[in-house]
Image: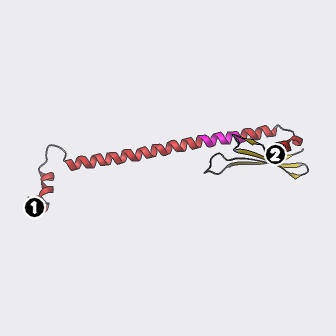
């Protein structure tokens, strides 16, 4: 009885007189918590999907840079300068070949794989010998 007097009459009726099931407030709280958990989980899944897609594109870009470099390794030294300024991977990648010394070239391969991410860069030296 002391508990009944300390609670407001409306709240006391909900808490003390309901012995058979859940109150409307309990159901609303449970549904709200369930919806919050569901929406949060949906955002986490969407974020994971976006991250996986970005990683896949980046991995393809890395493979493109590596393949380009491997092809350039097969080109004779005296023909490497012909590749200066060429593009690859839908014109998003660029090859730069410059003389460092008479018998030494610097080869730079750069690929802008995403407009908001840093480009993938590969720098190498190629000797005549």
- Secondary element under disc 1, as helix, strand or loop, is helix
Q: CA distance from mark 2 to mark 1?
A: 89 Å
Q: Quadrant of the C terminus?
A: top right
Residue in the image at 23% along x and 49% along y:
26
Q: Nearer the viewer, residue 88 or 40?
A: 88
Q: Looking at this rendering, what residue extends furthest in the right direction?
A: 102
Judging by the rendered image, the residue that carries numbered circle 1 is 5
Residue in the image at 25% along x and 48% along y:
28
Give the mark toward the camera: 2 or 1: 2
Total residue callouts: 2
Rendered image quadrant of residue 6: bottom left
Q: Is residue 129 magenta?
A: no
Rendered image quadrant of residue 62: top right
Q: Quadrant of the N terminus?
A: bottom left
Magenta region, residue range: 56-65
Residue 125 rendering spot, x and y as whole percentages:
82, 48
Predominant SS of the magenta segment: helix
Residue 12 rendering spot, x and y as whole percentages:
13, 56
Residue in the image at 89% along x and 42% along y:
78
Judging by the rendered image, the residue that carries numbered circle 2 is 84
User: In the visual, does 28 lie left or right of 53?
Assistant: left
Labels 2 and 1: the sequence-earlier one: 1
User: In the visual, does 106 lie left or right of 54?
Assistant: right
Q: Looking at this rendering, what residue extends furthest in the left direction?
A: 1
- Secondary element under disc 2, as helix, strand or loop, is loop
Residue 117 rendering spot, x and y as whole percentages:
62, 50
Rendered image quadrant of residue 113: top right
Q: Are marks 2 and 1 in contact (CB under 8 Å)?
A: no
């Amino acid at each position: 009885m002391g508990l009944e007097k300390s609670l407001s009459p409306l709240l006391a009726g909900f808490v003390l007189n309901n012995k058979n099931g859940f109150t409307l407030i309990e159901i609303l709280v449970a549904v709200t918590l369930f919806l919050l958990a569901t929406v949060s989980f949906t955002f986490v899944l969407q974020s994971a999907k976006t991250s996986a897609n970005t990683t896949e594109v980046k991995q393809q870009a890395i493979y493109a840079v590596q393949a380009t470099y491997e092809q350039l390794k097969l080109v004779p030294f005296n023909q490497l300068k012909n590749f200066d300024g060429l593009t690859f991977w839908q014109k998003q990648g660029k090859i730069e070949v410059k003389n460092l010394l008479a018998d030494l070239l610097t080869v730079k391969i750069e690929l802008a794989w995403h407009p908001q991410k840093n480009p993938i860069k590969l720098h190498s030296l190629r000797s005549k010998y």
